[in-house]
Amino acid sequence: MASSVDPRFGVALREFRERRGLSLRSLGQLAHRSKSHLHELEAGLKAPTVDTARHLDRILDAGGVLARLVDAPIDHAAEAGELRARVAASDVSNDTLERIEQGVDDLASSYPTMAPADLLPLVRRHLSYVVRLLDGRLTLAQQRRLLVAGGWLAVLRATVHIDLRQRNSAAAHLRAARELAEHAEHPEIQAWCLETRAWDVLTQGDHRSALDLSQQAQRVAPPGSSARIQATAQEARAWARIGDVAATRRTLDRVERLAANLPVPERAEHHYRYDPAKAAAYTATTLAWAGDPGAEQVARAVLADLDPHGDGGARPRRSASARLDLGLALVAAGQPDEAVALGAQAVASGRVVPSNWWRAAELLAKVEDLGVPEAAMFRELCVEYAPGGRSIADSTPS
């Protein structure tokens, strides 16, 4: 079984630390560990060793709780296999099904603002509840609603695992989501599985596979669906990374046409409902990656809208990404000094998730190549905040 971070460890560590009234710095002094290392453990960005867990148990009087979480890691593949297997045909009331579906929407709406390590245990619990209900006696209609709910939760869980760079776990739950969607005959979930895989391989530098997966997703997705639009936007990103500016522009034009008459969804923050207001942010990212001269103007407008007061705004993760996008656009426009400042703000916010870290590393590489004096300060921040102790030099996809 591939190792991965049990999100319960970080939650428990933070609870025991706060119960003792200790800051990260104070705990670091007691435990002889760096503040950044403890931060990564609490955020689920780094897996603790058994020795570290036992040491922290002693420091925090945790009664062995932390060590037990490390000694008994979660078998994500087994969990996903259990979910895929439990599609047998307990009476489930309509109220119960509605609460489950509401919970799915709540979790999908929390995705843009909640830290991945905090969201993951919530998704796991909701998914486990759906699995238990699938074991009972169900009508065909009830079974389909549970399969659909399970499919959405499995693809969301896979997305969170990708954000945490837990790719074996993500792959297992994408397979589960796809099979649940097939049983439920739900093509939109199937399309989101393909789109999610496209994003994952794109962040790993496999741009051609990302292009193929995003085009597959468009063929599977129902016409007019959010999945169809998002997969088209993902195709534009793949073209941008490949370096084909003309194809990038053409694909962005298709996105604009698809979203032209789309109403703003009731819950605009829902991860699986395309919000036309997001179009400018996708365009800024894509044009910045393509090195298009129009990227700077779009990226500035996006950042001003997301973060008008400079405090991160209502969507701090998206604001951090917008700063990186604008930084890349400014490098291309010959303004590397401001690009460094924006990159430093994004990294120091702590809101750049592991799957997006390569964007900060790419900006760092560009400003260092230009010999910008402030790049040394930016590198220090990147070293301090790099997730999971990863080497900065190894962070940028090829």
Image (cartoon, rainbow, N blue to C red):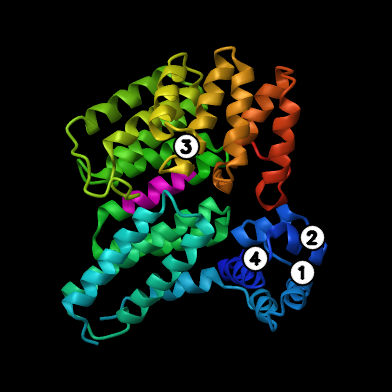
Q: Where is mark 1, residue-wise?
A: 52
Rounded to the nearest angstrom, the CA distance separating label 3 from label 2 is: 31 Å
Q: Residues within 10 Å of mark 3 (few under 14, many from 20)?
A: many
Going from N to C along the chain, the mark reached first, 3 or 4, is 4
Query: Mark 4, mark 2: which one is toward the viewer?
Result: 2
The one nearer the camera, 99 or 243, is: 99
| Main secondary structure of the magenta stretch | helix
Q: Are marks 1 and 3 in contact (CB under 8 Å)?
A: no
Q: Identify the amino acid type marked 1.
A: Thr
Q: Identify the amino acid type marked 3.
A: Ser
Rounded to the nearest angstrom, the CA distance separating label 3 from label 4 is: 31 Å
Q: Are marks 4 and 2 in contact (CB under 8 Å)?
A: no
Q: Magenta span covers which residues?
A: 190-199
Quadrant of the rendered image containing residue 16? bottom right
Q: Is residue 172 above or below residue 193?
A: below
Rounded to the nearest angstrom, the CA distance separating label 4 from label 1 is: 16 Å
Q: From where the camera sits, is residue 219 visible?
A: no
Per the image, label 2 sits on a secondary structure element best described as: loop
Left or right of 308 in this view: 2: right
Q: Residue 168 colored magenta?
A: no
Per the image, label 4 sits on a secondary structure element best described as: loop
Going from N to C along the chain, the mark reached first, 4 or 1, is 4
Query: Mark 1, mark 2: which one is toward the viewer?
Result: 2
Going from N to C along the chain, the mark reached first, 3 or 2, is 2
Residue 3 is marked as 4
- Residue 168 position, x and y percent, is 56, 59
Q: Where is mark 3, residue-wise?
A: 319
Residue 33 is marked as 2
Residue found at x 23% / y 33%: 259
- Residue 190 position, x and y percent, is 32, 54
